[in-house]
Image (spheres, grey):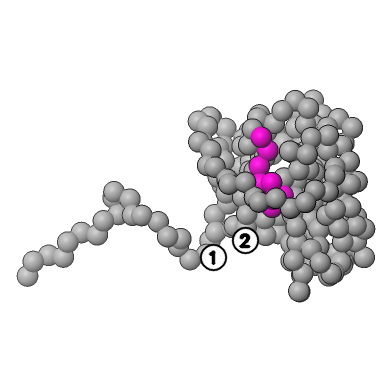
């Protein structure tokens, strides 16, 4: 059963799951609003000292692919794959954020969440809603941070500026748009701990897929 967090709550990720190859899903919506959902890989001074660890729609993965943007799925507005044991030593915090793209403010959003899924099973969830915010145009939702071991913190802190202002707040520079880099699939690592798997979509129709060897229908009997 998933552990539910409130703003300010923290826990060691090892207390939530033995897995280190994790799915992070964010669900956020509001009438007429669109959102940019990003992950900032920060150093010990909580600065974006390496722009390659700003993971967003135009840069969907870090150099060693320890942080990858996966897109909308399983009811989530945006999702990420985070492989903790591949994150380089200089990265001490991953800050997951959502910003309003265009007009609007965070008080207009409906109920949403950030959640952690390990091996296809949800292990942690921090729910939030627009009643917690006012005129902010961005929110820092949750952090993975390294303090002897990797931990998760439910943040829920509003921020007045948009994505560019948030980027500057972390010490990054706003660059011109570049074409998105193509995503490459990563082989799954075999381990006793839960491997990476996104959550199931119980209400979704079956997706397209080639039938497996055992799924060919039997021939009809001859009269």
Mark 1 vs mark 2, foreground winner is: 2
Picture quarter containing residue 63?
A: top right
Q: Residue 203 carries which label?
A: 1
Which residue occupies 62% across, 46% down? 181
Which residue occupies 81% across, 67% down? 102
Which residue occupies 66% across, 51% down? 179
Residue 111 seen: no
In the image, residue 143 above or below residue 6: above
Q: How many marks?
A: 2
Q: Position of residue 133 (x, y in %)?
A: 90, 62
Q: Which mark is residue 75?
A: 2
Q: Position of residue 191 (x, y in %)?
A: 53, 29
Which residues fall within the magenta stretch?
A: 56-63
Please, what secondary structure does the residue beneath circle 1 have? Answer: loop
Quadrant including the C terminus: bottom left
Q: Where is residue 151 in the image (x, y as percent from the top left)?
A: 77, 36
From the viewer's side, name the closer residue of 218 and 54. 54
Q: Position of residue 195 (x, y in %)?
A: 55, 37
Please, what secondary structure does the residue beneath circle 2 have? Answer: loop
Residue 33 seen: yes
Residue located farthest toward the bottom when viewing the structure as drawn: 31
Asked whether residue 201 is drawn in magenta, I would say no
Picture quarter containing residue 148?
A: top right
Asked whether residue 59 is drawn in magenta, I would say yes
Q: Do the residues labelled 1 and 2 touch (CB within 8 Å)?
A: yes
Q: How crowded is mark 2: few (under 14 residues within 10 Å), some or many (20 or more)?
A: some
From the viewer's side, name the closer residue of 174 and 155. 174
């Amino acid at each position: 059963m998933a552990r539910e967090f409130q703003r300010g709550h923290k826990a060691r990720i090892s207390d939530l799951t033995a897995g280190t190859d994790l799915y992070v899903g964010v669900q956020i919506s509001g009438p007429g609003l669109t959102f940019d959902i990003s992950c900032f890989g920060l150093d010990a001074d909580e600065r974006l000292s390496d722009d390659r660890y700003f993971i967003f729609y135009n840069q969907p993965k870090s150099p060693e692919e320890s942080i990858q943007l996966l897109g909308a799925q399983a009811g989530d507005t945006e999702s990420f794959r985070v492989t903790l044991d591949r994150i380089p030593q200089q990265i001490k915090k991953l800050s997951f954020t959502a910003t309003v793209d265009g007009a609007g403010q965070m008080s207009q959003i409906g109920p949403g969440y950030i959640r952690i899924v390990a091996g296809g099973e949800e292990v942690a969830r921090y729910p939030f809603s627009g009643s917690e915010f006012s005129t902010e145009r961005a929110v820092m939702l949750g952090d993975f941070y390294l303090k002897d071991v990797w931990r998760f913190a439910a943040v829920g802190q509003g921020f007045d500026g948009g994505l560019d202002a948030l980027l500057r707040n972390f010490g990054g520079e706003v660059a011109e748009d570049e074409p998105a880099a193509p995503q490459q699939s990563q082989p799954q690592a075999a381990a006793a701990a839960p491997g990476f798997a996104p959550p199931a979509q119980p209400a979704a129709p079956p997706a397209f897929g080639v039938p497996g060897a055992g799924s060919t229908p039997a021939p009809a009997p001859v009269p």
